[in-house]
Amino acid sequence: MTEPTHRVGANTDMSWNAWGDPAQATSLPESVRGLVGEVLGAPLRPSPGVEAEELVLPPCALPDAARTALESVLGAEHVRTDDGARVLHTGGKSTPDLLRRRAGDVEAAPDAVLLPADHAEVEAVLRACAEHAVAVVPFGGGTSVVGGVEPLRGRFGALVALDLRRLDRLVDVDDVARTATLQAGLRTPRAEELLAAHGLTLGHQPQSYEYATIGGYAATRSSGQSSAGYGRFEAMVLSLRVATPSGTLDLGRSPGSAAGPDLRQLLLGSEGTLGVITEVTLRVRPRPAEQLDEAWSFPDFATGTAALRAVAQSGVRPTLVRLSDETETFVNSALSGEEAVPGCLAVIAHEGEAGQVAALRELTAATLRAAGGTELGTEPVAHWRHSRYSGPYLRDALLGAGVLAETLETATTWSNLPKLRQAVTEALTGTLTTDGKPPVVNCHISHVYPEGASLYFTVVAAAGDDPLARWLRAKRSAGDAIAACGATISHHHAVGADHLPWMEAEIGGLGLEVLRAVKGVLDPTGILNPGKLIPERP
Amino acid sequence: MTEPTHRVGANTDMSWNAWGDPAQATSLPESVRGLVGEVLGAPLRPSPGVEAEELVLPPCALPDAARTALESVLGAEHVRTDDGARVLHTGGKSTPDLLRRRAGDVEAAPDAVLLPADHAEVEAVLRACAEHAVAVVPFGGGTSVVGGVEPLRGRFGALVALDLRRLDRLVDVDDVARTATLQAGLRTPRAEELLAAHGLTLGHQPQSYEYATIGGYAATRSSGQSSAGYGRFEAMVLSLRVATPSGTLDLGRSPGSAAGPDLRQLLLGSEGTLGVITEVTLRVRPRPAEQLDEAWSFPDFATGTAALRAVAQSGVRPTLVRLSDETETFVNSALSGEEAVPGCLAVIAHEGEAGQVAALRELTAATLRAAGGTELGTEPVAHWRHSRYSGPYLRDALLGAGVLAETLETATTWSNLPKLRQAVTEALTGTLTTDGKPPVVNCHISHVYPEGASLYFTVVAAAGDDPLARWLRAKRSAGDAIAACGATISHHHAVGADHLPWMEAEIGGLGLEVLRAVKGVLDPTGILNPGKLIPERP
């Protein structure tokens, strides 16, 4: 096949077999190469992966009648069945996804990629797919790391990816209420560009920032690095519009309401299994007049954690709150070539109105000082800001050097956090130690609440003969440890296909029946994202 | 019948035909009597209502088999069929409720009042009621003002009130995460007493504070007067336990989660139609070390509203934010006998840590000053705090003096607020003007969000010959105005039976089908609170 060059408008595609912009792909820096080889006790061996030209896709299985129906809705040019488009929609960006594609496995490729222009076309597509028994995988940025956009056919003979990139408008801005209505297919940088013209910002900055979309954030309950100040994505949502095979849902009438259950929170996090979110009205803010960054050092993770808790439970919430454990602090220092930070590094930022930020920063500083923190100035924050979207590129370089690298995350209460961290670390170490050499397991807190926090783990391990099977074993063990601790299986990566085994622990058998009943109403033929979020009845 | 004296433990009952403690009932103060007579242009005429001794209840319709089953679950002493218990569970505390009961209408009285001791008994009761086709009205404090505890039988021949007062324990406190697990039947003062022993507070203070229960707050998405600082009730909920005829739901694993839809938000606000909430784990805080109150005056409601918006959109959130319009400010001054406050009165408070409160208060004061506010000191706040739970007693005095008095509330975005206020005021004035004399319509903002605020209306009008029919016309007109403005039919009073006509405007026909499907799973025989929240299919 030819190299995929599937571009629409400003939406440059990511690499088919790696994260992000192909131009930014790097080989492993020498410093990392030495460090990793030494720590894992194994020499690195290049693992280049299959070239795009070598890929062989299965033939398009879309029945003619379905194709005709879809073309009549979208126009033939928006029903793409070329190899380039299909390969680019063959799953997301987890390490298992990338290992499969690097091995040339594109067997699951969707039969077609649909490019609707607006809500009405999305709804018409869903009706046509329901009628013709075609499975639909809604597709935003394609950044899922939990199998959320994996083309799983379930009981259907054909499957399409529903790419929302043409829904890319800022529909409305309300300067008084400070809300903006954005279409689902907008990637964050473009959304921020459109909002900046009004002096506004969304403030949502997950690591997937450059590629992830507004609709994807809503469908997966995303959380950005500035969640302490701006809130989780679902907390920013005033209203949303959802196309389903059974019609349209318009949810959200007011900033606060007691008019029954909050159905927004049933669609937020529904991951394309209950409907396709096409439009979201969001809280926005003026672009901050001031931003004050400060790095802090703590002697150890327990002291740093207690300090973050004190901040999260105080009357002042910084915009950004982050704490790396000892290992991550050491590794990041080594990667940056900067002077090593002792103990654990915390990154704190306050954004806001000119007259308020300095006073709020001072109150937070007093809390952190009292909790045993030492100020380190702004330099480490600048370094973190500079490199904060580059982690996935480093992972590709590691995979290319024959090293296994992946992340996973969870959250729990402050009181349960130490036990959870230990249990997950032990699960990962227990399953990934080879010849007495344990994996490198970094951990950080990047989202804080008054009652608890997230834990984000980065794992680097020897790849072994079958890195995919090796990681799946480790992931299963870590997931079981998370469930056994009573923590959530995902703080912000979502469920997708990969977290299905733990959904019953999360909401119980009766909770699953509730989701199935809702799906029965909104998607009676079951075409929407089969095999995701809601496990089949045993 | 005999005067109801249905007491269990510390739970003193409210009057059967009025709000609250019978000992606190007052006749209308002379100052108010004169004011009201003058404004409404009609002499007040005593309207004493029927005495308890005159009430005639329908015979208990509970079939023997059902009674036997329930007694075997609860013990005979916890299946109450005496008139006293039945009268006390004949609906809530809306003006229509009180007008009906004052007229001696207790035709709807439940056949029995059940008093389960714990979650397992609640679940067993629900199974028995499902088996014997007995409708169940979950009953907490009985403070609903929207018909939420009205004994509506639907298609069932018998109905029981499920009174949760024996579920009155503080189950657990987590000092590190600052959460507490409380049973559903706890009234707020008792819950606060139990928490105070740990140095903690919930901070939830709606006007129904003295009688409303933890479970009721959760079931109705309550919002307290300090919602600016403590948040809406549903935002305080970490997890909840719900008994349903189909089994138990345990929901909520983490302070933040992306593990699918947030099913907590489907049960919060379900108003006893999907299950019975028996236990809630809530965010709590240390009892504040410091509290700084300040009253402010604004020249008019528009200026005051803009000032509140500036505060709500700033980086500092006071604990309490409240603004009365010109009429309410005038009326409250007249009632208090204090010197009249010019324009519109705002009440602001900051609570929190000793080292932070003064600084935060200063930042808020700067915002309010810049927006045209004038500081009035603490005196008006002290007066407001002193009388803040007494409004419902005043309403009883007005009803007893033959005057119609009621409240209603809604919420919308800041940009839509002036239009909404005007439309509701016009609807109430249009339907309640008599002989050229309009009703008194007070309005205040008592809950603010970055994107908008609540509007709370208090109406005092001539009663006319049929005050119940008169109010229902006004309520219908106001509700239609709210829906036409795109606002929510309730910010914190919930749906109950009274707001059913506007639920389709609120969530759409497809949203209603979603709720019906969820009910089909959790309450397949439909025994739970018939006629509430979810309208029948047309």
Image: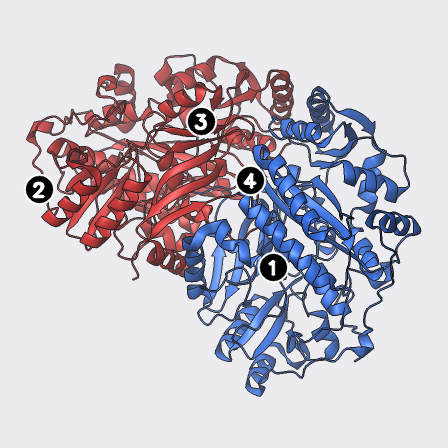
Chain colours: A blue, B red
Q: Please state which of the two labelled residues, at mark 1 or mark 3, is closer to the viewer.
A: 1
Give the percent coordinates (x, y) of residue B231: 50, 33
How many residues crowd around disc 1 within 10 Å: few (fewer than 14), some, or many (20 or more)? many
Sequence-wise first label, 2 or 3: 2
Give the percent coordinates (x, y) of residue B265: 46, 46
Give the percent coordinates (x, y) of residue B365: 61, 21
Q: Which is more toward the observer, A88 or A11?
A: A88
The residue under label 3 is which amino acid type? Glu
Q: Label 1 lies in what chain?
A: A
Q: Quadrant of residue B85?
A: top left
In terms of secondary structure, where does tag 1 sit?
loop
In terms of secondary structure, where does tag 4 sit?
loop
Q: CA distance from mark 2 to mark 3?
A: 47 Å
Q: Is residue A464 visible?
A: yes
Q: Which residue is mark 3?
A: B326
Q: Label 2 lies in what chain?
A: B
Residue at 54% x, 59% y: name it: A533
Above or below, B376 against A501 in this view is: above
Say the numbered circle drawn on residue B58.
2
Q: Please state which of the two labelled residues, at mark 2 or mark 1, is closer to the viewer.
A: 1
Sequence-wise first label, 2 or 4: 2
Q: Which residue is mark 4?
A: B255
Q: Please state which of the two labelled residues, at mark 1 or mark 4, is closer to the viewer.
A: 1
Residue at 25% x, 43% y: name it: B137
Say the numbered circle drawn on residue A498.
1
The residue under label 4 is which amino acid type? Pro
The residue under label 1 is which amino acid type? Asp
Q: Is residue A143 visible?
A: no
In terms of secondary structure, where does tag 2 sit?
loop
